[in-house]
Amino acid sequence: MNPVRKRRLLLVMVLLTAAAAATALVAMALQRNVAYLYTPSEVLKGEAGSHARFRLGGMVQAGSFKRASGSMEAHFAVDDGDATLPVVYTGILPDLFREKQAVIATGHMQGGRFVADEVLAKHDETYMPKEVADKMAMAHQKHGVQPVADAPAE
Amino acid sequence: MLPELGQLALILALLVTALQAILPLAGAQRGVGAWMALARPAAFVQLALVASAFAILAHAFVAQDFSVRYVATNSNTLLPLVYRYTAVWGAHEGSLLLWALILSLWTAAVALFSKRLPQTVIARVLGVMGAIAFGFLAFLIFTSNPFDRLLPAAMEGRDLNPLLQDPGMIIHPPMLYLGYVGFCVPFAFAIAALLDGRIDARWLRWVRPWTNVAWGFLTIGIALGSWWAYYELGWGGWWFWDPVENASFMPWLAGTALLHSQAVTEKRGTFRGWTLLLAIAAFSLSLLGTFLVRSGVLTSVHAFAADPTRGLFILVFLGLVVGGSLLLYALRAPDDVDGAGNTQPFAPASRETLLLANNLLLTSACAMVLLGTLYPLLADALGLGKISVGPPYFALLFTLLIAPLILLLPFGPLTRWQREQASRPIAMLVPWAGLALGIGVAAFFTAPQGPWKVAAGLAGSAWVLLGTTRFLWSRLRMPGARFTPEMMGMTLAHVGVSVFLIGALLTEGLSRQRELALAPGQSVTLGHHAFRFQGVVRSPGPNYVSDLGTVQVMRDGVALADMHPEKRTYASGGQVMTEAAIAPGMTHDLYVALGEPLGGGSWALRVHVKPFVRWIWLGAVLMALGGFVAATDRRFRHRPSDRTTQ
């Protein structure tokens, strides 16, 4: 092989190795950092079983919110219209967290309770997260909540 | 009456842009001078029309005309005057109108400052910009008309989203859009070059300052967004790898690559095809960002409307623009553009190679962000379940890709074009690398917490700063050498990187934070600072009621300041907003946010000490300044005859 070809071959091999390494790395990083979204009824049916950490989506059940005076530990239940799951969270809840509002909590199951380490209710008062809306198309109607198209945007 | 005039102005603007797109492009193809001459006047008329429409909408907000649906949804009689102006772009319709206005501004600016370009080039550039404007105006008129009437008129407006009632929001969207839309100029130029079949160094010299200025605005826009999220969302974070943030960050990464590759193409003639592709990519990513934000396909901290027709329209528009320009690129670029002219070969050890590495790393980072952002959509479409990609994915891969970029950065300016003795720049930088490493090691062993981040931040920052200083020194020492605004801009931007590294990594490594319940009189200590909670009183604001807390801060027993975090309840929708209290400083910010009342006068509080967090935005400002300063270089205004050699 002449030197030019040799150099090109080397370059191609380096590029291929780099591409393979990058793909492997990206796949690994994605695999570790994706969190699946489930509703309480899916969790109770055992569909979330294989994921230690997942996101729980649904509505905060009316009258379920409890917090002992002076304590940071909050208890509430998430409801998808078919099933209900108790959730415990220690920390400050987002401004838009309210009963009968959509919520997404990230965490894991522990003895029949969902222990959340993050609670999001980031949308405005009339807007419903699209993924939760999709998941709860039926339950949605039971709660009489509609995603509003004209919600104030960004 | 006025809103109808606004509507009419928009429709006329749509017709003008159709004219501006079709005739000059056809004229350039066929060589009809009269058709090409239409481009400039059309650009000015378009600006006049869109600006009138914008002014009419602003007037409707100021005059509280609740018979306009958009005003009724996003304003309120109690809304303070300044926010009535910002409410114009506070939601979907108005922010699209702002998009269109800024596009008209860029188009008119191009028409004004392009007298030295050949007529066919300017006709094509303005024609392409006209076509883009046509698409956006059609989108505005047919799916998101801001002048829609509400009959009967509302008695009271629904109010602007409280999150947006904030000074930062006044300038964040215009800056961001100036950047986003500004990438339309290099894009239109790339399309014009592809249609023409050749790239001329002259035109490239003409387009470079436009890219620099657009990039500078985008940098400021992103920094403002990050700053806003920091003080307004009340979480104390400055970057969340949220889809909407990513949507603005991807064009920035592609634009940064474009800046560097344009410099190579202009000075050396190489990377022609690549520069064109990056120009197309940067603007396509701006459009993709608009699609992601405006269609509501992704959930994010930014609440936005989900309307399928809107999403579909942008998706089709995006497909046409991206697909069309890539097709054109595939047909024309390899033969006609890349091979043409005097490309100069370069050795493996040369500045070209370093800039190639810069481009590969930046575009890989951009591809990585794109994958992470679109992966949930992809998985959903393939029925793999509803997933979200967590920030650790982005943080890990971004660090891995940007670390080599930082490592190579100081070598770039010190290395010669075309061929370099690799040992020369290395010899120049070895002592400084040693010093930076020493700083890193010292930081590692003295940092109270997060030693890896602190060490990496200080060493990386010192390395970039020292390497850039080394370049300055050797440049200024050179007898008779000029120090051009272009070099000044580069130096500023690279120092900005250094400052940013300190801010980002020291904040991540050294921040202390607590979330806890405090009764009045109780206090919490973070490092040297003690925060004593004094209780909460209720006080009225213009369109809200506030729970105003008082927290007394002491440093090593000496009283520093009283901080007043707020919890606001807005009158119109009952929405609750956290207003964090921040005591800013160059070495650290103190950050206190109220959580919720826990009964018996005690509250949940979030308390942070965030070292060097200001440096993050200071670094971004320096980078943007670098972009603006470089754009003023007289070289870009020279006639083709006076070539400057590097």
Image (cartoon, coloured by chain):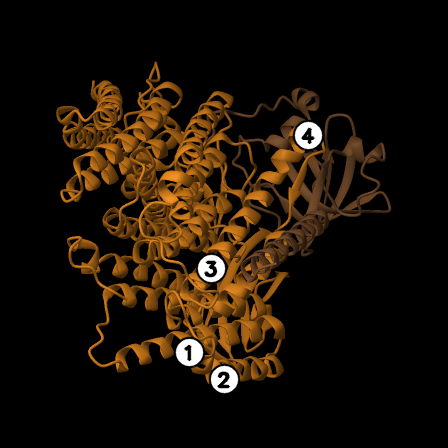
Q: Which residue is mark 4?
A: B382
Chain ID, mark 2:
B
Residue kind at label 3, given as amino acid type: Asn
The tint chain B carries is orange
**Quarter of the figure that contains the N terminus of chain B:** top left
The residue to which callout 2 is attached is B435
Relative to residue B237, is residue A64 drawn left or right?
right
In what element is the residue under mark 4?
Answer: loop
Q: Considering depth in this image, is B409 or B140 the residue closer to the camera?
A: B409
- In the picture provided, is B425 more to the left or to the right than A69? left
Q: Count the numbered circles shown.
A: 4
Q: Chain of mark 1?
A: B
Question: CA separation, marks 1 and 3?
Answer: 19 Å
Q: Quadrant of residue B133?
A: top left
**Label 1 sits on residue:** B466
Residue at screen point 54% across, 65% down = B404
Question: Real-space Cα distance between discs 2 and 3?
Answer: 24 Å
